[in-house]
Image (cartoon, rainbow, N blue to C red):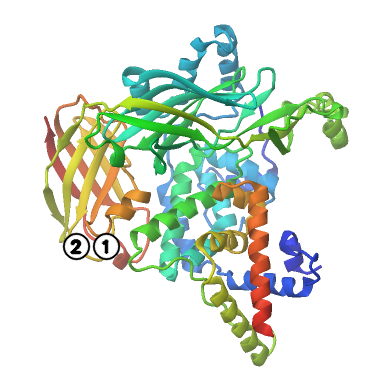
Amino acid sequence: VRGRRPFTDRERDILVHDSVVIPFGEGYGAVSESEEDTLVAAAREDPAAFGALYDRYLDRVYAYLRARTNVEEDAADLTQHVFLRALRGIHDYRGGRDRFAPWLFRIARNAATDFYRRRRDSVTWDLVPAALEPITEGDLESGLLRDEDLSRLRALLATLDPERRELLALRFAAGLTIAEIGAVVGKSEEATRKRLTRTIHALQEQYHDIDR
Amino acid sequence: MTSIDKRYPDLMGDDDGAAPERARLVADLDRAYRAPAPEHLRAAIARAATAALPVPEQRRRPRWRRPTLVAAALLAALVAGVASANVNPPLIDEATRYSPAAGVVLRQYAHSVNVAASACGYTLRLLRVYADANRVVVGYTLSGPIGRPFRSEGADIPVLADARNPRAYIENLNLGASFGVVGPTEGLFAAYNAYKIAQGARTLRLRLTLPSASFDEDIYPLALGAPRSSCETYSDGGIRQVGPPFPVLGAVPALAALFPGLTNTVHERIVSIHKPLSVTFTVPVDPARRVITPRQTVVAGRTPLTLDHVVVTRSETRVYLRRTTPGHILEFLNFTLYAGKRRYNDGIPLFHDWWQDHAPATRLYDFWFEGPPYDYHGMWTLVVQRDPYVMTAPSRLFPGGPWVFRFRVP
């Protein structure tokens, strides 16, 4: 049976500070996979330790949900919902081969699916968010050209079926590995890899054709 | 190598001579999907999560890796006779340990069946089935080839369907498993939403399918190789520390990979079987059902909410609420049900097909509670209120509350 090694000094710093619940969202994001195992184990014992995991995944969960909704406020509300559900369900997380990231994104995916089904009258699936960041690189002209490229890319993405868009959202917005994506969507790693690779290949051909 | 190359090495194929275009596409996809969380969200979740703490919930599912529990399960199975039929019901009971309502119906009201399907030395054996107006519960075992040192990380979700229409899947509500594959059998249970199939039916003809299964298998010693089967696929499960590292040898990682026994580690592989295992069975629908129709509307904070009806069966209590105001949905609400002095928290919303079929046209939403006893008679109270931990704009919350419904269950 897999044992849990003792906490390192750094992990203790992350988890506990004078027996006070650690503040959430205060810069504990940079932890390694092995540290994450320890953090998950700690969070299962003491929900106060969940803060470090939350910090690590907030942007990724939000970006994924932003890709699944077309209103920023919806993504923000769903993100809250996902983390609170994860916090309450951390005891149910079984660990081991089922890594934390797929577990968390299964919650996020279910939340997005439920949300969409309840609001299907007013929400369309997966409109890749319009550029949220101001142009900061290069000059204005090149920035505008890049924005045109992104607009064309979004138009292409809109033609894909939901399953393929889901794979892309999990890879690019959520930042999951192919194995993790397989765990989220319930497919083998090999099947996921093939599907994603074919999607990228098809997109590339169309993207290239537009340029000609 | 650019940061994009590093982050997406699996997508940077150069086999078609179009590497630059591929790199550009991947970079643009990365940019298109980029959406940093707003700062106010970070603070909002921090406050909400901190407010939600502590959460001293009783652990509802097994702590799979606790040595004493697994050892106890192994010992119990060995004493009882490893692969005998007698050990299977306790394994299923163990699987429902953290879902007591499912355990009650499987122990007291379920029907014994004994149908099995095998492939590649793996066997799915259905032992107990139960159905009522709210849900179908099945208890079954999954066995691997004898003599293989498996540890289960949980089988796939079995698919339940109408036997006459195998594509008509029935929504899964709950799962549970015993403490690993024991000698080499694991007990499991699964519960499904019977709403669509059990209304008015006396019996159900159903088909349970396990699409695939996977286990962790210890390979020892790795240097001698491990047996392979054409039925199975394998992937690396990594090295697992089974105790404190041995002095001297334990400090050499290379030795752990080659000779795990010398370093108090074992090497695991993940064994997967992709041949579906299916069994077909018939289960009578338990007629024990009480339907209460309070049709009770409560106005709180100027917002009306109606408790339409309640269906009480042995497996669960399901409450149906109707929204009467436009523009809001019943999200971020807490549900507490009181049956006499007993209290049941967290009515769990049924989403999926139910929402698709019924909301928003009827504005009827249902929530289920495991636990409220079918045989309890008297006054029941349902309290619906906003989740105090969700912080969002007031305009986005279902306004008003709390709503308190009282109804008598005869």
- Nearest the viewer among B189 and B274 is B274
Amino acid found under the numbered disc labelled 2: Thr
Amino acid found under the numbered disc labelled 1: His
- In percent of width and height, residue B86 lies at 49, 10
- Pointer 1 with pointer 2, Cβ within 8 A: yes
- Quarter of the figure with residue B341: top left
- In percent of width and height, residue A181 lies at 60, 52
Which residue does the numbered mark 2 point to in the structure image?
B325
Q: Compared with residue A164, is residue A88 higher up or lower down, i.e. above or below?
A: above
> Farthest residue in the bottom direction?
A141
Q: Compared with residue B305, is residue B410 higher up or lower down, i.e. above or below?
A: above
Residue at 19% of width from left, 26% of height from top? B376
Circle 2: element type: loop
How far, Cα to Cα, is label 1 from label 2? 7 Å
Circle 1: element type: loop
Chain of the residue displaying label 1: B
Number of callouts: 2
Q: Compared with residue B47, is residue B122 higher up or lower down, i.e. above or below?
A: above
Specify the label residue B328 is tagged with.
Answer: 1
Quadrant containing the C terminus of chain B in the rendered view: top left
Residue B387 shows up from this direction: no
Residue at 64% of width from left, 50% of height from top? A191
Specify the label residue A73 is tagged with.
Answer: none
- In percent of width and height, residue A197 lies at 68, 60
- Dot 2: few (<14), some (14–19), or many (≥20) neighbours within 10 Å? few
- Nearest the viewer among B101 and B246 is B101
